[in-house]
Image: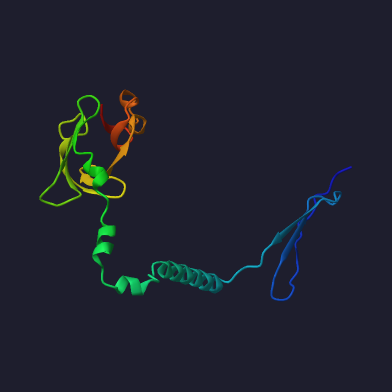
Amino acid sequence: MSKKRGSLFLVKLAIGSAVPLISAKGLDQDESQITLQLSPPPVPLAMMKTALTLSLALCTMTLISGCNDDNTAASNAPATEAGAEQSQPNHEMTDQWVGRWIGVEGLFLDVSQDDSAGPGHYLLEMQYGLDADQSGTFEGQATDDGISFSRDDGQQLLRAGDGEATGLKWLAEKEDCLVVQAGEGYCRD
């Protein structure tokens, strides 16, 4: 008894404007196995471009409206002395950081007030790496989170922490530390 190879056949139905496709294939005439495959109707390219353009426009409008300042009356009002003082970061905390801080392997940080620049401004003299070019004096300014400063490796923030926050096992037991980033910290005894 020899098997006859079946034929491949397709059945397509069109209903209204939507065109679902139904494909059926039989492998052998002796077998009753039929595979059905449904495909979504094709979307014209012009419709896809229009939908994409509208979506992009909607996203842009949403982003722009989020940047709007709804409190225009308050932003146009003149600043009072109390308002100006509130916008100044609290430098009383960072004033307590003035002095020498010790890191590991000869690294150090000397914080001093920069009187010529005014309250909340500091000079940070530091050896922050083992290489000779990883040292210098940098101008810093008090922020709500610490002292912000810039050096060759980018914008940095000096903030209060403990020995564990430094990420250095040699300083882990210390309680009074300043941290620049994980692996760079300076402590007092």
Judged left or right of residue 138, residue 72 is right
Q: Is residue 47 left or right of residue 73?
A: right
Residue placed most toward the observer, 61 or 187: 187
> Would residue 158 be found to the left or right of residue 48 on screen?
left
Could you say which quadrant of the image residue 65 lies in?
A: bottom left
Q: Nearer the viewer, residue 37 or 158?
A: 158
Q: Nearer the viewer, residue 170 or 13?
A: 170
- Relative horizontal placement of residue 109, taking residue 144 as reference (left or right): left
Q: Which part of the image, by quadrant, shows the N terminus? A: top right
Residue plotted at (28% across, 63% down): 83
**Colour scheme:** rainbow
Residue at figure coordinates x 58%, y 72% from the top left? 44
The residue at the point 63 percent across, 68 percent down is 42
Give the quadrant of residue 47: bottom right
- Could you say where residue 43 lies in the image, as x and y percent from the top left? 60, 69
What residue sits 26% from the left and 72% below the top? 78
Tell me the quadrant of the picture where the C terminus can be found: top left
x, y (%) of residue 122?
17, 45
